[in-house]
Amino acid sequence: MKHAIRMVCAWGVLLALHTTVAALPEKAPAGDGPAYGPELQGFDYPYPVARHKLHSQDQDLEMAFMDVPAARPNGRTAVLLHGKNFCAATWGKTIAILSTAGYRVVAPDQIGFCKSSKPQRYQFSFQQLAVNTRELLDALGIQRATLIGHSTGGMLAVRYALSYPEQIEQLVLVNPIGLEDWRAKGVPPVTIDQWYERELATSAARIRAYEQSTYYAGSWRPDEEVWVQMLAGMYRGPGRDRVAWDSALLYDMILTQPVLYELEHLQVPTLLLIGDKDTTAIGKEFAPPAARSALGHTQELARLAAARIPRARLVEFPELGHAPQIQDPATFHRALLEGLNADAAP
């Protein structure tokens, strides 16, 4: 299947691989900010991007990914799964740390996200995304890996581990969402048209306010602005409608496909890395006030999840929010490496 992989840019010389990360602007761009294409054309990733061609649901699609070799290989591979408002690029610092620690690192953009195809007609499901990811790993010759999923990527990682347990050495869930059933707790039905209308109103200001309160527990650093502009730039560009439509389809998938009911069936060592101040709850804004207050209590949800997963270990970051790997990289990566060493499967 090697013919299915097309390199977008040459590797060139990988200097200082263990410290390479994306060049981050210190301040928000002047004016309205940058405009990117529907597949994030114009936004640079920290490592070379390749594309895996796949035929899915009667259409030809491309799945963008980074495949970074280990500085000194330990024989293990880490696969990083991004969240809903994240991309493979947001794993830049984690890729550098893991590569230095000896891991080959594969970080894909899922179909519908970031630099991957944005199909207009697609039955999005976590099972479909898991199948797509397995096809990519098969094409790369990867039979077993440590799976690290953040946010929505945590939901996908759970589905993948349930579907293909023989391929998983370890499972790491970083502030996974889906640990509660939002619909059962009072979020009303939300149509794709409603999600689409909401997404068309996306702006940098709205993204920034949400990320500051939820991802970073009220704190803010100038270097976090790049991730605001990464998202907002797609909504300023020529593919705005496509980006908004796929985003609407993806929100519908997240809201209607909880994974918490199957946590007891996970068979692999599972490390939960949780920023306790996270309040993420999909659809919360549509819920009546009485229901809204009961949603998104991540610390409690993580502890309940850890009790239900047979081989789970929970590490909490009391002062961090939804994106601990960005908010406090040093603390997060220390816990990640310690957990990977402690929980490694024989």
Image (cartoon, rainbow, N blue to C red):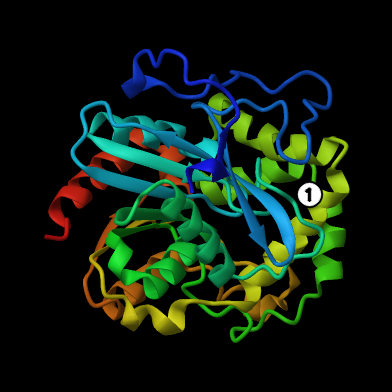
Give the crowd class for mark 1: few <14, some 14-19, many >=20 residues within 10 Å: many
Q: Quadrant of residue 183?
A: bottom right
Q: Against 225, is 256 above or below?
A: below
**Residue beneath label 1, please?**
243
Q: Position of residue 304 (x, y in %)?
A: 34, 77
Residue type highlighted by circle 1? Val
Q: Position of residue 13 (x, y in %)?
A: 42, 13
Q: How many numbered badges does the structure rendering display? A: 1
The answer to whether residue 201 is visible is no
Q: Against 79, is 305 above or below?
A: below
Question: In front here: 63 or 198?
Answer: 63
Q: Position of residue 276 (x, y in %)?
A: 40, 57
Quarter that holds the C terminus: bottom left
Q: Against 206, is 89 above or below?
A: above
Local secondary structure at mark 1: helix
Q: Position of residue 336 (x, y in %)?
A: 27, 46
Image check: 126 left or right of 134?
A: right
Question: In front here: 182 or 264?
Answer: 264
Q: Against 210, is 331 above or below?
A: above
The answer to whether residue 45 is visible is yes
Image check: 262 left or right of 254?
A: left
Image check: 96 left or right of 260?
A: left
Question: In front here: 55 or 279?
Answer: 55
Question: In front here: 177 or 119?
Answer: 119
Image point 64% across, 80% down: which residue? 291
Image check: 176 left or right of 59?
A: left
Image point 86% across, 52% down: which residue? 200
Image point 55% across, 35% down: which residue? 50
